[in-house]
Amino acid sequence: MARLERKIAVITGAADGIGHAIAEAMAREGAHVFLGDIADSAGEEFAAALRAAGYRADYVHCDVSQKADIIGLIDSAVKKTGRLDVMVNNAAIAIGGMPVHEMTDEQWHRLIAVNLTSVFRGCKYALPHMIAQKSGSIINMASAQGHIGLDGWTAYAGAKGAVMAMTRQMAVEFGPMNIRVNSISPGTINTPMNDRLIKEIGGNLARAWVKMHPLGRIGEPSEVAEAAVYLASDAAGFTTGTDLRVDGGLTAAPRYVPELL
């Protein structure tokens, strides 16, 4: 039997990168996945490809900075299936690479809206369904940046640190209702978002990333997806309030400051 057989899972930021890998892995393990993203063409094609492979998948447009879109994504899953077993708050953007005093208010508010407020809303609107059925697993995407410092990423690290703190609090609060809440902290992962950063900053960034990870490489989205499948599955039935670091040893190593320029 597949690890997520008959479970209903909602994943934000599912059109590419880590969210794409999580959705694919969960569908492969038997879940009916509901994919949220703003990249509608890519999201629709992905959902169609999953269905063609024999899996259950639906795509719903979802800009996680908009409350109505998050409500719509969750409601579409519940209306179609009658329940919600797994909520993966994955969508995020990378705004950084600058001293905090050079960051604009507009950049700050945009980052917080996508990386933190969306997690609050994803949990807020998923929880009533999970409370009613007395079960559920929420997985919030944090980051190694929430554990260690790196020049230029104060706001990003602050948002991800807040995600971990919220996760622990909700695990305590909703544990008695059989709802598990965990986070995942990836290290540097081979995603389109990081590809864009390399193009903006330069190839030295990619080489620095490799040196920062004791395993001598950056991670693959599928490796984070395996952690998400575990946390969503019954195998993690006694796991809550934890942050699972999938970071190639990045946060275990002495601080390495890359020479980017």
Image (spheres, helix red, strand yellow):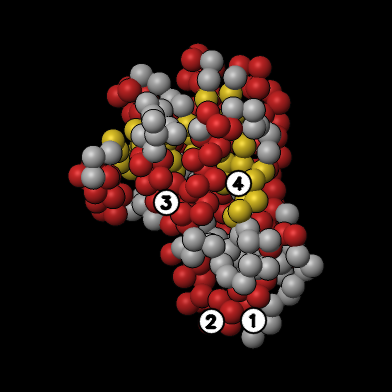
Q: Residues within 10 Å of mark 1 (few under 14, many from 20)?
A: few
Q: Residues within 10 Å of mark 3 (few under 14, many from 20)?
A: many
How far is mark 2 from mark 4, CA to CA?
Answer: 27 Å
| Residue drawn 37% across the image and 46% down it | 24
* Residue kind at label 3, given as amino acid type: Ala
Of callouts 1 and 4, the N-terminal one: 4
Q: Give the quadrant of residue 241.
A: top right
User: Does the residue at mark 1 contact the one at mark 2 (Cβ under 8 Å)?
Assistant: yes
How far is mark 3 from mark 4, CA to CA?
Answer: 14 Å
Task: Work out which residue is located at the far right of the displayed protein and give it.
Answer: 254
The image quadrant where one finds the N terminus is top left
Residue corresponding to mark 1: 260
Residue 152 in sight from this viewpoint: no
Expressed as whole percent of the image width and height from the top left, the position of residue 84 reads 43, 25
Expressed as whole percent of the image width and height from the top left, the position of residue 7 reads 41, 28
Mark seen at residue 202: 2
Secondary element under disc 2, as helix, strand or loop, is loop
* Residue kind at label 2, given as amino acid type: Gly
Residue corresponding to mark 4: 184
Of callouts 3 and 1, the N-terminal one: 3
